[in-house]
Image (cartoon, rainbow, N blue to C red):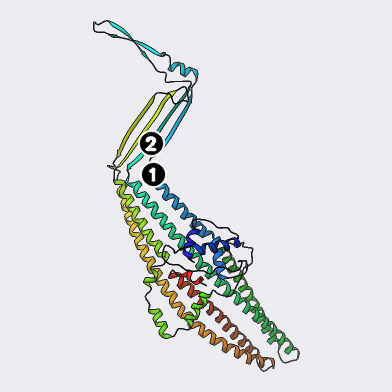
Amino acid sequence: MKTDSYFRKKSQRSYPTVFTGMISILILLFSINGYAEEGKHVPIPLMEKQAGISDISMTEAVFLALENNHALRATQNGHIAAKWAHRQAWTQLFPAISLESNYTRLDDETVSRANALGNEITMYFPDSTGTLQPVTIEIPQSVFRNGYETSISGRLLLLNPAVWNGVSLAGASKDLAAGEVQTAIRSTVHQTLRSFVALLRLQSLVRLQEEHVDQAVRNTEQAERLFRVGKYSEADVLRWRVEEAQQSGILTETRQGLKVSALTLENLIGVDPTASISPDSVLPDAIRREMSRYRSMNEDAWEEFLAHPLMDVVELNPQLTVMEQSKRLAKLQHRQSLTAFMPSLTVAGSYGWQNNDTPDLDGDKTWAVSATVSLPLFTSFSNYSGYQTTKFQMKQTAETVEDARRSLLLGAEAARTAIRTAVSQLRLAETSLESARRGFEIQENAFKLGRLSNLEWIDANLALRSAEQSHTTSYYDLVLAIIDYYEFTGEILSLLEA
């Protein structure tokens, strides 16, 4: 099963938008597709169930995005347009033949004036003895009330460097558009994975916050009961009511963030914004394997991982491939400016039937052949200015590509370091959460017996909530760091392996 080949085919055709139909097509494609042009393949698990809006998995969300994302579709259509533009450029190297037929209707007065001399004219010329002799010359009628004229003309560019280089330019643009499709596919996958993880994190935080709100409600009720029996003051009850209101406010804010995150994911996968997204919290096997691998690494393994050179890996990133193709395009554009100084040769010919009063091709025949040579001698330095412009644009592109290479390398290094940091933070969060839960159990028993002050009980709740939120955040931070690292190294599709 080769996904890169499938992704390329999606830039050339469109599949049904009904997801159940897409599953059967995917099964066929994955069974017949060969290796991708880069010589790599990344198998992606086939979906075993229909991808609905409820309980949608991360892999299903990615497939929906690849099928429905409007930005990706725009890039794919741009690639198709570039292919047709390349074909159009090639057509300029072949002959152009056209048929022209004209019909003209004139008023009687104009026809009469044009034919006033009649169909013949008699002229007198001296003979050998000097005697004038009449000579009658027929005058063919060339103006008709209903006139028909037909001709066939052809044109061929024998020498035109601008057109030849234009074919190369169109080909480079086509290759660039193909690279942009691959980059857009990986970018769509990356954005979808990040949005999906962000949604999972906010859902977890909402569930935690709901538990804290319930706990605050129970604490307020407990404080009111203790107040009624004289063990709590009214101020203690008010503190718990304030705490309950604060927790409810945090829950409302978190739910709003969850709604925005869901809308972001819905926009990426191209579903109805009014639909309700319910993501499956089970991560793909490949991501869970990577998380386990990083969490099990010792210090020696981390040193080896962080010391491994990334340049060779970054060079495989499709984004850098696209940038290199833009360098080639800039060089061809510079070469195009040089063609303005070169000569061109065009051959043209025509064959036709002169104007008469019948649409039949029976008029007097005429033909012509011409060759045109053009050489720019002086253009007020316009061509030279264009040459200098493209020269420095080519240099600008080269510097931009080098900057992109360094940025990718820096991003990969930062993502690799973020994995190490996330693993450390997750271990710390797990220890803190275990400690906070144990402390909360002890404090809860003391609070129920009335042996704990209001402030001490509030602190115990805050410590547990902070530990739970820190653990949730650290867990998904590690997932995001892995996703970002694989995006920078150009291997993000491997995270969808079965």
Q: Image height check: is 416 above or below 88?
A: below
Where is residue 196 shown, x and y percent of the image?
56, 70
Circle 1 packing at 10 Å, graded few (<14), some (14-19), many (20+), is some
Name the residue tied to disc 1: 92
Quarter-wise, where is residue 48 in the image? Answer: bottom right
- Can I make out residue 381 in this image? no
Name the residue tied to disc 2: 154
- Can I make out residue 39 in this image? yes
Q: Image height check: is 97 above or below 222?
A: above
Q: Residue at x 40, y 18 (%)?
A: 140
For the residue pair 447 and 296, the one nearer the viewer reads as 296
For the residue pair 93 and 486, the one nearer the viewer reads as 93
Where is residue 480 shown, x and y percent of the image?
50, 74
Kind of residue at badge 1: Gln
Quarter-wise, where is residue 91 in the image? Answer: top left
SS category of the residue bearing label 2: strand
Q: Residue at x 58, y 82 (%)?
A: 468
SS category of the residue bearing label 1: loop
In three-dimensional space, the C-alpha distance between marks 2 and 1, rounded to whole angstroms, equals 13 Å
Where is residue 136 shown, x and y percent of the image?
35, 11
